[in-house]
């Protein structure tokens, strides 16, 4: 099994040192596995997509505009 090295901020490392009973490599392994599963699902969902990067960026702007307008209306009521 391959090994990886992680760099962590000192404050997080201090917390980890205080909890030596936790198998931190297992915590990291599970987090990476969950993220990899999400990426695999995303790849499977988009593999046959004909959308271009430009199409995606246009949809992104419309979604963000809709969210902004939703909360803007909510704030004014």
Image: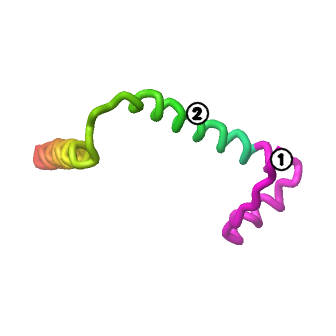
Q: Position of residue 47 (x, y in %)?
A: 41, 31
Identify the image quadrant of the C terminus.
top left
77 vs 39, left or right, is left
Q: Which residue is mark 1?
A: 22
11 to 64, vertically: above or below: below
Q: Position of residue 63 (x, y in %)?
A: 22, 42
User: Quick check: is 16 in the magenta stretch?
Assistant: yes
| Distance CA(mark 1)–CA(mark 2) | 24 Å
Residue 71 makes an appearance in the image: no
- N-terminal of the pair, mark 1 or mark 2, is 1
Residue in front for this viewpoint, 8 or 18: 8
Identify the image quadrant of the N terminus.
top right
Element type where label 1 sits in the image: loop
Element type where label 2 sits in the image: helix
The residue segment tinted magenta is 1-26
Q: Which residue is mark 2?
A: 37
Q: Nearer the viewer, mark 1 or mark 2?
A: 2
Residue in front for this viewpoint, 52 or 40: 52
């Amino acid at each position: 099994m391959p090994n990886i090295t992680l760099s962590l901020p000192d404050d997080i490392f201090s917390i980890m040192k205080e909890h030596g009973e936790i198998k931190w490599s297992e915590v990291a392994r599970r987090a990476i596995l969950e993220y990899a599963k999400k990426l695999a699902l995303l790849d499977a969902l988009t593999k046959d997509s004909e959308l271009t990067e430009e199409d995606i960026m246009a949809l992104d702007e419309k979604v963000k505009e809709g969210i902004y307008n939703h909360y803007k209306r909510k704030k004014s009521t």
